[in-house]
Amino acid sequence: MLRHIQAKGLRASTDILIVQSRLHAPSYAGPGRWMIIQAAKRKSFLAAGADVIPPAIEIIANANTQHKGRTVTTRGEALEGQLAKLESIGILTRGVDRPRTLTELYHLMCVDYPFRDYSTSDWREKDLETMLQYARMWPPPPSHSEYDGRHIPLPKSHALTQPGNGLRNVKNALIIDRLAFLLEFVFGAVGEVPSKFLPGVRRTSPSGGARHPTDALIELVQDHADILSGSYAYEAATHNLVRISGSSSTGLSADCFAKITLRSTVERAMWRYRDIRAFRPLVLDAGHIAEMISIVAAELDFQVSYHLPSAGPDVSSEWLAAPPLLEIRLKDIGDEQVSYPCGREARGADEIDIAPPPTFVLADSDREFLTNPFAHFMLAKDGLVGRTAWPSTRELKVNSSDFLVFNHCIPSQRGDRIGTMEGIVKATGISTDRIRELFSQGLLVDRREGESLYRGVRLWARYGWYLSLLKVVESRASYDGRPLDELNERLQQRQSSLNFEKLVRRKTCREFSSSAVDPLTLMRILDHGLSGTELTATVAPFAVEGTDDHLHRWSPNGLVPTAVKVTRDEVAKATTGQFPSAAGAFTVWLIADITPSLKEASAYETRILSLGMAAHRMCVCATQANLGVFLTPALSEGDTLRLLGIEADPATRIGYLLSIGRPLSGEG
């Protein structure tokens, strides 16, 4: 087969990814165990066939290798038909492509994603029909997080009811009082967003669909009055800290009194948004929250620094329900100049430590194996490799025969496959040495660990978010607490004093008046959001005094006009028919070049965080100027770049749109 494929000039495309079919499409109940995803085409194909190893898997595994693989069972006309079909759908190609990273494949699947068209007259009816279907399957999750454990009330701060007075009252107060104000102002609910199916809340930061998935874990380095040092979850609905275990302050500098880890309670967004592109707004949401923390912290004499999360020693699967995205470290630069004994853990008498799961050291005869739910398969230079990022990033070149083992070790709903070494050898004929190698490289896991992992993965799989989970797990494998220079450099520019009452009253604006905005206000908003960043911005000044209606590029020295003109209808069309996207006095497209971020997993999320943070600075600045803001990441990269006259590959850009103007109701 190998000679036949090579004689035809065919190779397996490096745009493909192979994953378990029942994790990618959990409603599938057939015999096919593997799904082949063509990332560039955003299409999935079930690898099925009469044999245990489908012909498509055999062909892919052998197409790019120089070594003899398993003898393919397909012959003659059947083989010709298979090759022709696989070439027609882009799984085989005649070109020589460079190997891709998982981040590249994931991003390719998100580019120009086909969102619902909101310009059609029946979009509300279609959306209602979708929500009815979801509601019949299972109810939505709560709109706020609740935690089990010892609840410790934080000092009352009046951050949301009397934000101005509350801020003045805590400016010179103890650290814990100022921290309580910060947490309540950033994470507390300032109102409700009614909905028949999915009630939401309003915070001082915007969030797609009022989902607000971002929650906070707090690590205190020292005791504060009756609150002991250690790890807590912030429960916004009760303004309580809830004691948890499993983290430590080790590694924090001596003048850092706390760290806040932003994590995304993913199901709050999953229930409403069930597509691969829906993870990006969660990262943008965390960017908005991170910037709001920075803004409030500056008013409280706290200095912040942004870091990758510290993964720590956790080897359980509990984090899958709320993966960490960003770590924010706090220093006190006010009158309370204290160095804290980092690493000290004061403990209450009623506290129980939860030890990490034991490491099982078993003989081959006693161990049972499962296929790692995070195992996936990609094309390297010389063939197919199996990769996993849990519990660490590893990869191993695999051949088609290895799929006999992977098939056998996928959890069986009937429980009829024996997962011991003896059982696998008997069922597959694969040697014990090879099985041990698959286990040592993480493609197989111990059943005791694997069953816990599969339980955690099911949350993502049931909503169609499994591919996003693979991306999240790969990023998490690189979490080491290191500082994020791209985000920290912007922190040197401190904002002037703000009207916090306006921030509490802020709402997303969808209807704007026809009033024009003065050009100084426009530039102040742009400069405040973009100075010190690597982002670019294009502005459509539909109603800006003294500014012609051509598109303009932002630069630190002012706006640079272009020869391109766009209409409001054209903008809405490129933004899935969302008419508020062009209803303001001006529309701004923030564009991030993600080319450098595609090689390092966590850098991808960092660049999206920077988009959210810049947009939030602009949103805050506009709110202070009594302007309303509409934001959306739901835009077509290709259509947007063409509309703006930007010559760039859509697969190398991520955009975020803001429409800003005077609210029709007079309230922003």
Image (cartoon, rainbow, N blue to C red):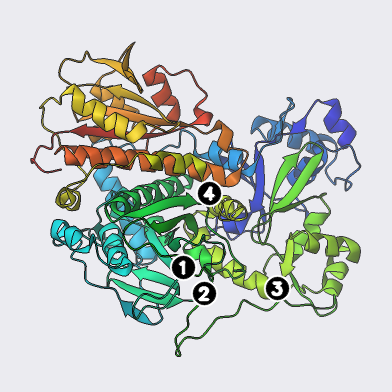
Q: Earlier in the sequence, mark 2 or mark 3?
A: 2
Q: Earlier in the sequence, mark 1 or mark 4?
A: 1
Q: Earlier in the sequence, mark 3 or mark 1?
A: 1
Q: Secondary structure at mark 1?
A: loop
- For disc 3, the marked residue is 447
Q: Earlier in the sequence, mark 2 or mark 4?
A: 2
Q: Position of residue 310 (x, y in %)?
A: 55, 59
- For disc 1, the marked residue is 340
| C-alpha span from label 1 to label 4 | 20 Å
User: What is the crowding at mark 2: few (fewer than 14 residues within 10 Å), some, or many (at least 20)?
Assistant: some
Contact (CB < 8 A) between labels 2 and 1?
Answer: yes
Of the residues tagged 2 and 1, which is closer to the observer? 1
Of the residues tagged 2 and 4, which is closer to the observer? 2
Q: Position of residue 111 (x, y in %)?
A: 49, 34
Q: Is residue 206 left or right of residue 423?
A: left
Of the residues tagged 3 and 4, which is closer to the observer? 4
Residue at position x 59%, y 55% in the image: 480
| C-alpha span from label 2 to label 4 | 22 Å
| C-alpha span from label 2 to label 1 | 9 Å
User: What is the crowding at mark 4: few (fewer than 14 residues within 10 Å), some, or many (at least 20)?
Assistant: some
- For disc 4, the marked residue is 483
Q: Is residue 581 visible?
A: no
